[in-house]
Amino acid sequence: MVPENSHLITIHTMMGAKNLDLAIQCLGSILRFCRHPVEILVHEDGTLGEQAREQMVAVLKRVRFQNRSETDEIIEDKLRSHPRCRAFRKRHLFAPQILDIPLLTPPGKRMVYTDTDVLFTRPVECPEFFVGGGAPFTGSRDLRESYSVHLKHWHLLGKYGVPVGSRLCAGIMSFDLSVHDVDYLEWLLRLDEEHRLFSAYPFYMAQTFCAALAARVKAGYIDPAECVVAHLSSMKLVRKASIVHFAGYSRNYFHEIHAVIGPETEHLPARKLAIVSVPACGLGRRFLSAARAKFLLRENPSGIR
């Protein structure tokens, strides 16, 4: 286990025993190719046994673990005056992404997060993302507006004064702790309780709340040509990108991309990744996204997910 080191940038992730091999390959690529001093902190779901932890330590070296049982006690105390956040945390798989991890990030640090299916393909530098000093919130650009609000209810966001950033993906993101506002999240959950505003697609609730936090500050994407969500429609970009997010069925393309990373890749000059501004997502963008999803982002024709 790596002891906590104030000079290291801690990259948080969430995982359990499922997809251990994929996680090791992806997290290993970050440690190998990120040209900033980083370590991985795994927030485990209670299923990650001792053997799996030992395997990760043996391969990754710079990895620590946050036990779920310890986390529960700490976060329950921190959320004692936010009952809706506490209830959301208990029922939603990705709630720790927007609650636990920011609340456990030490003051003065930037919260940096990645899913375990994000692969770095070559050396990269991105101080604004890993260290800060630029956009207070930085994420990656999604294929579409993947949010939990139904298109027919989108106008209610304006009615209740809830802006969201356009096409923000929370699979790899970082933000200053000043961005994280538990009172605001509690209020959003109250809106959902009263109007079911965020419950059309519950899987995306945490990502929607991330986009809502981002819209209150200056937000950015990691260069969308360099940080790409894999999909049949984006494979030309994927084959050239420095960071690839293999979400869902796009993991079928993982071995193709991973196979071209050879020993010589480590000696390539680091790409310096830019940050570009995130526009707001209005009703027009949400409508166009729905049309794009219907006609251009069809499911994998093989049916494999």
Image: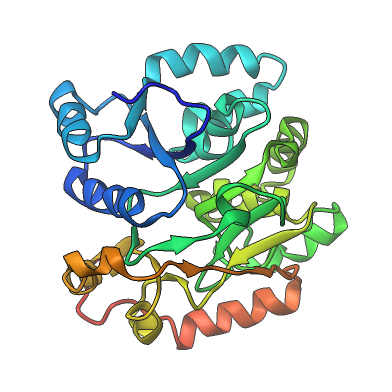
Which is more toward the observer, 84 or 219? Answer: 219
Q: Is residue 123 above or below residue 82?
A: below
Q: Is residue 278 above or below residue 106?
A: below
Residue 34, percent from left and from top? 41, 54
Q: State the count of labels.
A: 0
Which quadrant: the N terminus?
Answer: top left
Residue 131, percent from left and from top? 60, 47
Q: Is residue 13 visible from the viewing direction of this image?
A: no
Residue drawn 67% across and 26% down? 107
Kindly indicate the quadrant of the structure image that contains residue 126: bottom right
Residue 294, percent from left and from top? 48, 82
Name the side, left or right, on which 36 lies relative to 254. right
Residue drawn 53% across and 84% down? 292
Residue drawn 47% across and 35% down? 8
Which is more toward the observer, 247 or 161? Answer: 247
Q: How is the image coloured?
A: rainbow
Which is more toward the observer, 258 or 44? Answer: 258
Q: Is residue 200 above or below residue 94?
A: below
Q: Is residue 162 visible from the viewing direction of this image?
A: yes
Kindly indicate the quadrant of the structure image that contains residue 40: top left
Residue drawn 72% across and 16% down? 81
Residue 272, percent from left and from top? 52, 68
Which quadrant: the C terminus?
Answer: bottom left
Which is more toward the observer, 270 or 20? Answer: 270
Name the side, left or right, on which 117 lies relative to 146. left
